[in-house]
């Protein structure tokens, strides 16, 4: 159906998909309608000229400090479904850089904005866990569920990670495009609850 009018570069399984977001992550996704558009967008991603902004709720207080995680990633040496921070020089390791900016401190949790310099598999989730602030609801890279997560489990549809904004050059016209997706209802409700409990 729709796949017939999309780029064929990724074959029949993922036609038109230029970049991916993790399962149970919400937000903006760009799909190329033809191969030329696909090549242009993929090149922009490779050159780090696509601006990708995410929102997340993470465990812990970042003390209003912005920062950068520069930690290379590769497949986990034991669990091949997971990614892990591994030393440079390890087979299969790829550079990965995530910038984060606190939005609201809730004490036990923080709402943060993240900008991806690279887009590795599970990058934000692994990086935030690596610095001791796993994404709320992340059952792969997070710790045991906190009492807050247990109380509000009905609002946790996977990890609280949202691809909020994409900025890139239109593959044909070169015009700068900015696409934005509002926070999912559940994500917004969790923020409201955290605000109320913080008072």
Image: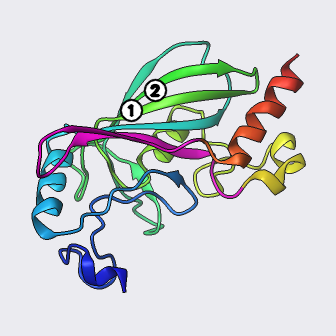
**Rendered image coloring scheme:** rainbow
Mark identifier at residue 100: 2
Q: Residue at x 64, y 36 (%)?
A: 57
Question: Do residues under tags 2 and 1 come within 8 Å of each other at their CB atoms?
Answer: yes
Sort mark 2 into few (<14), some (14-19) or many (20+) by Cα contacts within 10 Å. Answer: many
- Give coordinates of residue 105: x percent, y percent: 68, 19
Mark identifier at residue 115: 1
Quarter of the rendering occupied by the N terminus: bottom left
Q: Residue at x 12, y 51 (%)?
A: 43
- Give coordinates of residue 141: x percent, y percent: 58, 51
Mark identifier at residue 4: none
**Residue 44 on the magenta segment:** no
Along the line of sight, the residue nearer the viewer: 103 or 63 = 103
Sort mark 1 into few (<14), some (14-19) or many (20+) by Cα contacts within 10 Å. Answer: many
- Give coordinates of residue 173: x percent, y percent: 11, 46
Q: In the image, is residue 127 above or below residue 122?
A: above
> Judging from the image, what secondary structure is the residue with disc 2 in?
strand
């Amino acid at each position: 159906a729709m796949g017939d009018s999309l780029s064929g570069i990724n074959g029949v399984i993922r036609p038109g998909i230029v970049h991916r977001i993790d399962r149970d992550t919400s937000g903006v996704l760009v799909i190329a309608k033809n191969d030329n558009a696909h090549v242009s967008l993929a090149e922009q991603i490779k050159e780090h000229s696509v601006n990708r902004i995410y929102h997340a709720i993470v465990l812990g207080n970042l003390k209003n400090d912005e920062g950068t995680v520069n930690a290379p990633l590769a497949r986990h040496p034991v669990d091949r479904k997971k990614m892990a921070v591994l030393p440079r020089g390890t087979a299969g390791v790829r550079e990965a850089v995530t910038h984060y900016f606190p939005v609201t401190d809730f004490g036990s949790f923080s709402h943060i904005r993240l900008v991806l310099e690279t887009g590795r598999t599970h990058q934000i989730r692994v990086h935030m866990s690596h610095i001791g602030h796993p994404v709320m609801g992340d059952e792969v890279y997070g710790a045991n569920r906190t009492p807050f997560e247990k109380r509000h489990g009905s609002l946790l549809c996977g990890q609280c990670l949202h691809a909020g904004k994409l900025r890139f050059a239109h593959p044909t016209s070169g015009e700068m495009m900015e696409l934005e997706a509002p926070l999912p209802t559940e994500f917004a409700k969790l923020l409201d609850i955290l605000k109320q409990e913080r008072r």
